Image (cartoon, grey):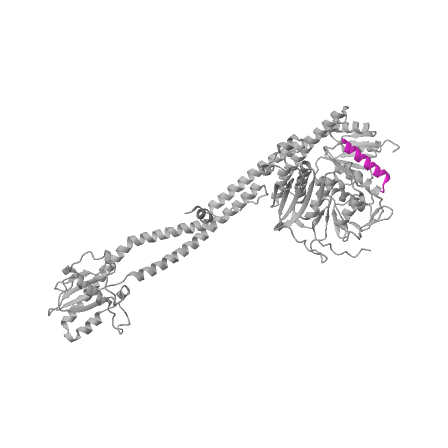
Amino acid sequence: MTRIWDRSFWNRSLASQLVGFMLVALLLSQGLGFLIYSDEHGQALRETLKEEFLLRSASVARLLETTPAIYHAEILQAADTSYTRFWVTTDAADDVVTWRGSAWRQLKTPLPENKDGERAPAADAQQPGEPLRFPGTDNMIAVDRWEELAPSSWPLDRPARFVRLDNEFGAGLVVPLQGGRWLNAAIAKSKKPAWMSQSALSLAISAVLLSLIAVLVARRIARPLRRLARAAEALGRGEATVRLTEDGPDDTRRTAEAFNRMQDRLRRFVDDRTAMLAAIGHDLRTPITTLRLRAEFVADEEMREKILATLDEMQVMTEATLAFAREDAAGEPTRLVDLAALAESVCDDLADLGSDVQFSNGERIPYRCRPAALRRAIRNLVENAVRYGERARVTLTIAGDSIEIGVDDDGGGIPEAECERVFAPFVRLEASRSRSTGGVGLGLSVARTIARSHGGDIALLNRPGGGLRAVLRLPQAAAVEPIATHTRTTPRGQPAPRPVPQP
Amino acid sequence: METTPHIAIVDDHGEIRELVARYLGEHGYRVSSADSAAALRRLLQRSAPDLIVLDIMMPGEDGLSVCRDLRSSSNLPIILLTAVAEDTDRIVGLEMGADDYLTKPFNPRELLARIKAVLRRANSLPPRQAGPRSRAIRFDRWTLEVGRRELVSEDGVAVPLSTAEFRLLTVLIDHPGLVLTRDQLLDLTVGRTADVYDRSIDNQVSRLRRKIEVDPRNPSLIKTHWGGGYSFVAEVTPA
């Protein structure tokens, strides 16, 4: 099995594996059964045939002896069946090989058409007129001599000579008749067709049924597994996870229960830590306020400004910690909001506070989201751009099936290797730390948590022309046409016609 | 200002109360302090402050309830101090009729700037015509969600406003039909916070128009008056 096969198909679905295993098992059992029973079966059949053949030959011999010679030809012809032949010779065939040749020739000779329209089946193996050859010449005929039949298996009182024609059911018999003539009898029966077609059909039916069952079973097993995978994935992303339904077979139910319990414990753990973080952040506000006030009374102006700068930094850190804690405990409901106006308002606010932020206006995009959270995510990206990259250029575009909010700055970018690491909480790059630009390294982490909880993500990439580009990508599935509550509703991006002024 | 303004500071935290009082005192204000809602009421019986700086989180009766109570009987300017910069606090604070709010930890200089702005407004500008603001205000085809700073269109899509846009719009809504000069608008909006850069009122008006007007170049809600000023002509109803 090649690696590609191994990975792409075999390992991919439980159903295919089950089907594979069951088919292999089926073939093995059938094969073994055939090996074990076919010989027994064949043996029994051979014995029966031989017995019948002998009885029939005896009857024909007796018949020939009791009837006038003129009827003999007809009797012989009537005794012939599609797989047996009877003929009379004047001399006893002593040489087995020669006799066998003539026996096959007899068997090959087609019966007259009026005999039920049947033809000798042995003719299947060898075309008439072809040089005579024995089927399976290479492995047949263990004994090339006549066998005297035991009186127990031979009904007549005179001895008969018996020989096998092949390894299947082929046999020959020579019986002396009164008057010095000999009755020759030969039988050859092909056993192949009946066995093959029936077994193959039943094998095929079994295989199809087993495959169907395997697929059904696999799907029954796979469905709860898929649900579990989805839930675990969502839990890993920090989304508010749906609880798994605890039903189905015992194993499935126990797995679901265990997962739900784990989820509860995790949530409790995170909640406790978040509450602690929030409490610390919250409690720090009062001392910081007090210190701020005290600093105002410091006479030394330089000292005062330095204290205030330090306090500013502390405040930023507590705010960030609180924002982080809040986002973790997010309970904001999802609402329909114009994404363009939301991004623009964030940019305008920061621009009003003196940052170099520009928003290139896009069309109206009604979008289902948690606006306060999304606003925080965008603000974090824009603030980062301004802090580390002088300015922020914000764009809002629809790209394929997602909506992209791009934030470009004019800074030095960050090493490619760091582009993922900076999303981890409390990670700050060395360069930013030494520049003492503030922040605790939670901004991107919070922003990504928010983006992912909306089913999107954030990526950082260095722009070819220099500067960093942060892309917040949101799935467009949540973008909706505004709910029509009014006949005046117009297509997206178009203002509704003016209402008639009220008096 | 001829007389020294009298500020009342209400906070249960002794050190902060004391320091704010001292700080404001050094900047030429007369300050009384109270450590609870009850103490404030006693203070109000004795004297008449020009402005109250009120902490929301206090044991006993909290700041919001005091604010609502005061608003029902007077126009006394109130600046709220909130502990959390949460939307809910802001919503409720503005609903209760506070003139402004600051989140802790606040910058004392900013407190000073806001006190000045609120006092100036209280003394020299047309008073707000409406009583305490309601949670949502309806005009034209919009509903203004005050707490969220959002306009909601008829088709249910929320359009977030920037802080400056929101302030301008609330000022306009508070004075419907009245022509406000650029200076007055500046005082009423930018004046609220010292740290907001002075984007021209014209610029803000045009931004706001772009969001609320059907045809921003031919405005029907915010009218321009030659010789200086703007007026809000839409009918305003509490939602």
| Residue, far right | B2
Query: In the figure, B123 relative to A50: above or below?
Result: above
| Residue, far top | A300
Apparent side of residue A220 relative to residue B15 in the rendered image (left or right): left
| Residue, far bottom | A70
Q: Which quadrant of the figure contains the C terminus of chain A? A: bottom right
| Residue, far left | A179
Q: Position of residue A297 (x, y in %)?
A: 77, 25
Query: In the figure, A476 relative to B46: above or below?
Result: below
Magenta residues: mostly which secondary structure? helix
Total numbered labels:
0
Q: Residue at x 53, y 40 (%)?
A: A261
Residue A333 appears in the picture as rendered: no
Residue A418 appears in the picture as rendered: yes
Q: Residue at x 77, y 43 (%)?
A: B167
Apparent side of residue B73 relative to residue A450 in the rendered image (left or right): right
Q: Position of residue B136 (x, y in %)?
A: 75, 47
Q: Position of residue A5 (x, y in %)?
A: 44, 48
Apparent side of residue B100 relative to residue A210 in the rendered image (left or right): right
Q: Residue at x 86, y 38 (%)?
A: B123
Q: Residue at x 41, y 51 (%)?
A: A20
Q: Position of residue A332 (x, y in %)?
A: 65, 43
Q: Nearer the viewer, residue B65 or B108?
A: B108
Q: Quadrant of residue B86?
A: top right
- Magenta segment range? B108-126
Asked if the stretch drawn in magenta spans residue A365, the answer is no
Asked if the stretch drawn in magenta spans residue B125, the answer is yes
Q: Quadrant of residue A57?
A: bottom left
